Amino acid sequence: MVAQDLKKFTSPVFPFTAIVGQEEMKLALQLNVIDPKIGGVMIMGDRGTGKSTTIRAIADLLPEIEVVKDDPFNSHKSDLDLMGNEVKLAIQNGDTLETELMKIPMVDLPLGATEDRVCGTIDIEKALTDGVKAFEPGLLAKANRGLLYVDEVNLLDDHLVDILLDSAASGWNTVEREGISIRHPARFVLVGSGNPEEGELRPQLLDRFGMHAEIRTVKDPLLRVKVVEERTSFDQTPQTWLDNYAEQQQELRNKIVAAQNLLPTVELDYSLRIKISEVCSQLDVDGLRGDIVTNRAAKAYAAYDNRTKVTVNDIAKIITLCLRHRLRKDPLESIDSGDKVSKVFKEIFEIEED
């Protein structure tokens, strides 16, 4: 009983709608929540710019999900792609499944995590006491149907980053350990953050993140004062602060849920798809990931705006986020990769420069 009460108790989280500025990061996170198939977001920015605060805030904003009770994989009661093998067997046997509501899981991956802790491993306790081979789920199981956040992802072991990106792309985690072979759902939004001063992520790993948001420290003194005052006020009286923003939080929550439901009906014209691929081709983007992600993100943005048809303006809002990290780095080039994407987009879509 005490464990259940502790599970329900959570420390207050800064409201997502109260975050000042950083629109690019907020948009990327919201679109990934609307369509997790976009493939996650990499956030690069200076220290102390609110990266971790924003990511925890979006997880707290999202509505509760219904999961099968006492299931380690947060299984869905009817969607086969989101349920573990035990739940599937129970359904086949005609068993009645008990469900419960839980907050969207938000898993923090520490830099020192081992592959066994991330993917899962053999349950040593059961092996020693009962003499059976049992699987002990890892962080990927815990993150199913939620968010997986890796701070300083550029300092994480490349092999682990590869495992995370594989699972995020396929929605499944396969474990082969000491005679155990198991495959379980791992459908999550992968969010990585890092400081460019500590080194870049390898290009082949960076390319596998759906979006790349760059954030800068706020320069305007008035905005800086506002941020400091709001944070201080929240720390002193968190509950009052949460009550003040409850209505705005609910509005945004409803907007995201409506967009998730509308997404399957959103259409992207063939002529616009051709132009998106033209932009990718002219920018010399390797592979087709850039085209796929831009198409998905444009549809998610239209759904977020409560429309069923994608416009040129939707593509303009998201194309830099989707392509800037896929360009080949030229050390002699002075133009910023984001500006380069924007310039080529305007040329191909025949939009006049401001």
Image (spheres, rainbow, N blue to C red):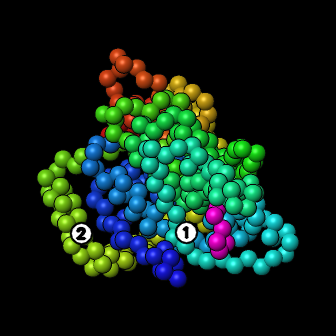
Residue 71: within the magenta?
Answer: yes
- x%, y% of residue 239? 30, 78
Q: Is mark 1 on a helix, strand or loop?
A: helix
Horizontal relation, residue 92 to residue 326: left or right: right
Residue 215: within the magenta?
Answer: no
Residue at left offset 15%, top offset 59%:
225
Query: Who comes first in sequence, dot 1 or dot 2?
Result: 2
Image: 352 above or below 89: above
- What stretch of residues is rendered in magenta? 68-73
- Residue under numbered circle 2: 235
Dot 2: within a 10 Å radius of its alpha carbon, few (fewer than 14), some, or many (20 or more) residues? few
Residue at far bottom of view: 1
- x%, y% of residue 84? 72, 61
Which amino acid lies under the numbered mark 1 shown in the image of this protein? Answer: Ala
- x%, y% of residue 18? 31, 66
Total residue callouts: 2
Dot 1: within a 10 Å radius of its alpha carbon, few (fewer than 14), some, or many (20 or more) residues? some
| Separation of residues labelled 1 and 2 (CA atoms) | 32 Å
- Residue under numbered circle 1: 258
Give whichever of 211, 82 is nearer the camera: 82
Residue at far right of view: 93
Residue at far front of view: 129
